[in-house]
Amino acid sequence: MKFRTKQQVREYVWRKIEPFSTFPPPYNRIPNFRGAERACERVKELKEWEKAEVVFSAPDSPLRRLRELCLEQGKILVMAKPHMKGLVAIDPEKRVRGTLKELLRAGREIDWRDLPEVDLFVQGCVAVDLTGNRIGKGKGYGDREYSMLKNVKCYIVVCHELQVFDDLSYLCEEHDAKCDVILTPERVIRCR
């Protein structure tokens, strides 16, 4: 299927994923979906995960289990606050669930300038293709977060199989960051 705009891709995905989505509804956001926990668990299959000490996570709902895994396995978790209103760092000693509310309460505020070197950058998406082109909800937060990080070793996107396309490169621009790995409930995809 050929789309004319990123917005057409978003609207297509939001309609298609609705039967598989969980709270909140998928429209105008990064969709949360049944199977997100299983997709997040796949991160343990990556050698990059084993070596990672610092993981940066977007506040996206489908990433909750991945954030919990960070803390369970002794990794430092850094998370952007919603709408990029700052950053929080959560040390692994904190025993909290990966919900946004708990992480914001348990985390300590840090400045972007004080951000440690990030081993893994993890986001959700609305759509992604097999070469790593990611389409978000349209606010530009993901690309801005990525551009502010220093020397990210691996960029991971967690999504449902319905969100994975063969090629969306014709819709992407030069400033759009490309991911290295896609995690779905069914598979780990190394981007071409």
Image (cartoon, rainbow, N blue to C red):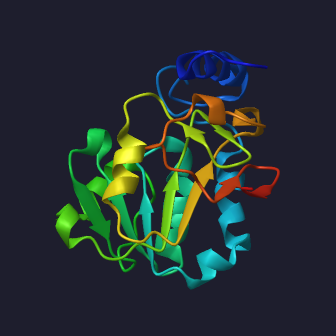
Q: Is residue 67 left or right of residue 9?
A: left
Q: Quarter of the image containing the N terminus?
A: top right
Q: Nearer the viewer, residue 81 or 190?
A: 190
Q: Would you place residue 5 above or below residue 70 in this image?
A: above
How many numbered markers are drawn? Answer: 0
Q: Nearer the viewer, residue 109 or 24?
A: 109
Q: Would you place residue 167 above or below residue 4 in this image?
A: below
Give coordinates of residue 17: x percent, y percent: 69, 25
Q: Name the residue: 40% across, 55% down.
A: 146
Q: Would you place residue 121 above or below residue 4 in this image?
A: below
Give coordinates of residue 52: x percent, y percent: 52, 79
Q: Would you place residue 89 above or below residue 146 in this image?
A: below
Q: Name the residue: 73% across, 36% down.
A: 167
Q: Name the residue: 18% across, 67% down.
A: 113
Give coordinates of residue 21: x percent, y percent: 64, 29
Give coordinates of residue 132: x percent, y percent: 64, 49
Q: Quarter of the image containing the C terminus?
A: bottom right
Q: Name the residue: 54% across, 44% down.
A: 124
Q: Kindly give the residue lying farthest to the right in the view shown.
A: 186
Q: Is residue 124 left or right of residue 190?
A: left
